[in-house]
């Protein structure tokens, strides 16, 4: 191969990828997400619960670690951090009904207890017995609900900017939603996805154009359903003190610049879970596992080592 051939390859391949990203964004977006899943040691599996398809990502071996995405999110919210976790644990990341590639039913209830029950039904099939469970935002709310409903199955909790307490729900964005019905997590048209990412992060992470288009179009297609689901979620009973919570080790993580759920929620969760420790992350918004995946994973690995040694 001549120097000219090498130069042509160096220039042509990125140019071709850029054109693919711009002019076939849906295909490029799906391929990009699949590639990132592979790089994180994850494989796509098919599951179901209560008549809903619940696909999930799985990788690694050892004690099961189940990760639950937030509202308007999906299983790929945890793909980047998973590469630091799959060398240590069997990581399971499902799409919840109503989100991602999971099934949808506009007549169904999507309250936290319903989603926790569906998650338990999925885990009956793929990871029976105790699991370590983590969740971001709505996913943290569901993780707390799961621990209340099935305390014998919750080996530990990892709560990342979690919903479910009055303090965490006191943010300006949620107050604005209560007053106007407007919420950046509700994507009405493809272009609104930019506002969602901007609201959820302190510094926007890199996302290819194609992935933004793919997720923006998916969000817009779900606008009516997610509008109804958000109303259900706001009406859901908040987490309350439970006798079982005292025995469950919990790591509470919160981005200091979170604008979706107020950082005061960290102290509220610490009061709910006496056997917990809290990490506040400066320069991080609502998505620690996306904004600083390596640091967030390192903190979690240290937490798991500490509870194993106890």
Image: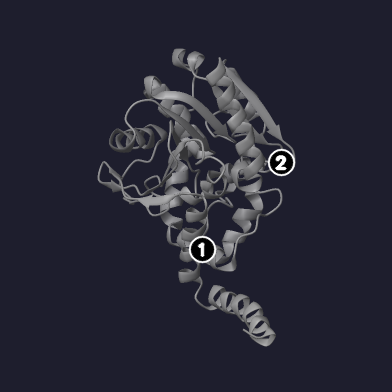
Secondary structure under the numbered disc 1 in the rendered image:
helix
Secondary structure under the numbered disc 2 in the rendered image:
loop
Toward the right, the furthest residue is 282
Residue underneath mark 1: 32
Q: Do labels 1 and 2 touch, CB within 8 Å? A: no
Residue 248 in picture, x, y percent from top left: 49, 19
Q: CA distance from mark 1 to mark 2?
A: 29 Å
* Residue 286 visible in the picture: no
Residue 140 in picture, x, y percent from top left: 51, 34
Residue 261 in picture, x, y percent from top left: 61, 38
Q: Nearer the viewer, residue 48 or 227?
A: 48
Q: Residues within 10 Å of mark 2 (few under 14, many from 20)?
A: many
First reached walking from the N terminus: tag 1 or tag 2 = 1
Quadrant of the rendered image containing residue 90: top left
Q: Residue at x 59, y 43 (%)?
A: 289
Q: Nearer the viewer, residue 273 or 289?
A: 289
Residue 245 in picture, x, y percent from top left: 48, 17
Q: How many marks?
A: 2
Quadrant in which the C terminus is drawn: top right
Which mark, by number, is residue 282? none
Which dot, 1 or 2, sits closer to the camera? 1
Residue underneath mark 2: 257
Q: Nearer the viewer, residue 294 or 170?
A: 294
Q: Residue at x 46, y 48 (%)?
A: 75
Q: Residues within 10 Å of mark 1 (few under 14, many from 20)?
A: some
Query: In the picture shown, does residue 287 fall above or below 141?
Result: below
Q: Nearer the viewer, residue 21 or 36?
A: 36
Q: Is residue 247 left or right of residue 280?
A: left
Quadrant in which the N terminus is drawn: bottom right
Toward the left, the furthest residue is 51
């Amino acid at each position: 191969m001549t120097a000219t051939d090498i130069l042509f390859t160096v220039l042509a391949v990125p140019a071709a990828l850029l054109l693919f990203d711009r002019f076939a964004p849906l295909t490029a977006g799906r391929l990009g997400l699949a590639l990132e899943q592979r790089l994180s040691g994850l494989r796509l599996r098919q599951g179901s619960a209560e008549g809903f398809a619940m696909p999930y990502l799985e990788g690694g071996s050892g004690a099961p670690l189940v990760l639950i995405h937030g509202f308007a999110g999906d299983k790929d919210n945890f793909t980047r951090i998973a590469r630091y976790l799959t060398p240590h644990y069997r990581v399971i990341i499902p799409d919840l009904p109503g989100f991602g590639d999971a099934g949808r039913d506009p007549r169904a209830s999507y309250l936290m207890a319903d989603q926790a029950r569906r998650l338990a039904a999925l885990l009956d099939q793929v990871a029976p017995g105790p699991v370590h469970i983590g969740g971001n935002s709505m996913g943290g709310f569901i993780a707390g609900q799961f621990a209340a409903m099935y305390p014998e199955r919750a080996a530990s909790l990892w709560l990342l900017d979690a919903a479910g307490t009055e303090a965490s729900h006191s943010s300006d964005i949620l107050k604005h939603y209560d007053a106007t019905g407007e919420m950046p997590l509700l994507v009405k048209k493809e272009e609104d996805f930019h506002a969602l990412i901007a609201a959820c992060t302190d510094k926007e992470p890199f996302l290819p154009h194609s992935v933004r288009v793919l997720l923006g179009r998916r969000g817009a297609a779900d606008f009516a359903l997610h509008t109804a689901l958000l109303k259900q979620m706001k009406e859901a009973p908040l987490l309350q003190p439970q006798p079982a919570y005292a025995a469950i080790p919990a790591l509470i993580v919160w981005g200091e610049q979170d604008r979706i759920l107020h950082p005061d929620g960290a102290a509220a969760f610490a009061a709910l879970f006496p056997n917990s420790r809290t990490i506040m992350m400066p320069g991080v918004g609502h998505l620690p596992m996306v904004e600083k995946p390596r640091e967030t994973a390192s903190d979690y690995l240290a937490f798991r080592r500490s509870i194993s040694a106890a």
